[in-house]
Image (cartoon, rainbow, N blue to C red):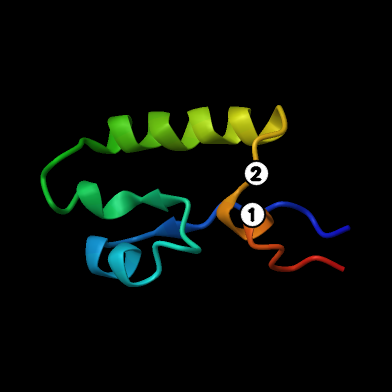
Amino acid sequence: MPAQSIKLATNTPMFTRMEDSMDVNCGTILDGDESPQEVGQRIFDLILRVALGENTKSDQFDFGAA
């Protein structure tokens, strides 16, 4: 079984185009809606939830499954 991956979009237009496969929109920093610390906390919280069994977007759509 492949390792889970959390996909980060570096900008909001990318996240919008690829929302079905992106887990986190980091573009909110550039948009001025969140600080780097806030986005970092969201990423950290997601890592913990995934480690405890939550599925990533790739898992939900069975991408990368062997």
The residue lying at 34 percent from left, 52 percent from top is 25
| Marks 1 and 2, how far apart at CA | 6 Å
The residue nearer to you, when weighing 41 against 58, is 58
Image height check: is 52 above or below 24?
above
Quadrant where the C terminus is found in the figure: bottom right
At label 1, the amino acid type is: Gln
Outermost residue, front side: 61
Quadrant where the N terminus is found in the figure: bottom right
The residue lying at 69 percent from left, 67 percent from top is 63
The residue lying at 33 percent from left, 72 percent from top is 17
Where is mark 2, residue-wise?
A: 55
- Give the left or right position of residue 39, taking residue 31 as reference: right
Outermost residue, left side: 32
Q: Position of residue 23 (x, y in %)?
A: 47, 51
Q: Is the residue under label 2 in contact with that under label 1 (CB below 8 Å)?
A: yes
Q: In terms of image quadrants, where is residue 50?
A: top right
SS state under label 2? loop
- The mark that comes first in sequence, 1 or 2, is 2
The residue nearer to you, when weighing 28 against 19, is 19
Label of residue 13 in the image: none
Q: Position of residue 9 (x, y in %)?
A: 38, 60
- Give the left or right position of residue 22, taking residue 36 as reference: right
At label 2, the amino acid type is: Asn
User: Callout 1 environment at 10 Å: few (<14), some (14 to 19), or many (20+)?
Assistant: few
Image height check: is 43 above or below 45?
below
Where is mark 1, residue-wise?
A: 60
